[in-house]
Image (tube, grey):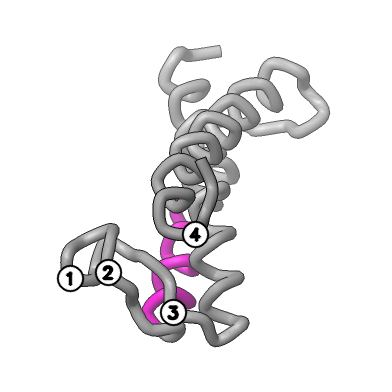
């Protein structure tokens, strides 16, 4: 197992976690923060922009998890690598978005 495979799976988990809030808010028709808003990450983007941004994140997660090495969700080391990326990204997102939506 090469180190870069674990790194790819870690970031695959992070991109997967980032896809969720953008895609869900976009599909529900709600404006939400995105890197394309003004100011970036603070202003609101349209629901269509968020659907597209969530989809891009999902495609990157698929490429990193499905195409780098042989990711196996049943392999504990593989799942931990992706899970750590997802949890750390989720914590960062909760902190960042919580400022605008009554969290933290």
Which percent across, then down, holds residue 29? Answer: 55, 86
From mark 3 to mark 2, how far is it between C-alphas?
9 Å
Which percent across, then down, holds residue 93? Answer: 46, 45
Inspect this view and state whether residue 62 appears. yes
Residue lying at the far left of the rendered structure: 39
The mark tally for this picture is: 4
Q: Residue at x 51, y 40 (%)?
A: 104
Identify the element where label 3 is drawn. loop
Q: Which residue is mark 3?
A: 31
Q: Earlier in the sequence, mark 2 or mark 1?
A: 1
Q: Which residue is mark 2?
A: 43
Which percent across, then down, holds residue 19? Answer: 52, 58
Q: Residue at x 33, y 74 (%)?
A: 44
Q: Which residue is mark 1?
A: 38
Identify the element where label 4 is drawn. helix
**Contact? badges 2 and 1 (CB < 8 Å):** yes
Circle 3 Cα neighbour tier, 10 Å, few/some/many (<14 / 14–19 / ≥20): some
Circle 2 Cα neighbour tier, 10 Å, few/some/many (<14 / 14–19 / ≥20): some
Q: Nearer the viewer, residue 45 or 68?
A: 45
Q: Which mark is residue 101?
A: 4
Magenta residues, as a range? 49-60
Q: Which mark is residue 63?
A: none
From mark 3 to mark 4, how far is it between C-alphas?
12 Å
In this rendering, which labeled residue sits more in front, label 3 or label 4? Answer: 4
């Amino acid at each position: 197992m090469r180190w870069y495979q674990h790194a790819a799976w870690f970031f695959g988990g992070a991109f997967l976690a980032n896809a969720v809030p953008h895609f869900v808010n976009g599909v529900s028709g709600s404006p939400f923060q995105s890197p394309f808003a003004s100011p970036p990450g603070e202003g609101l983007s349209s629901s269509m922009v968020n659907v597209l941004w969530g989809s891009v994140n999902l495609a990157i997660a698929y490429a990193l998890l499905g195409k780098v090495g042989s990711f196996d969700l049943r392999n504990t080391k593989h799942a931990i690598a992706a899970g750590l990326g997802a949890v750390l990204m989720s914590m960062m997102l909760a902190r960042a978005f919580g400022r605008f939506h009554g969290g933290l």
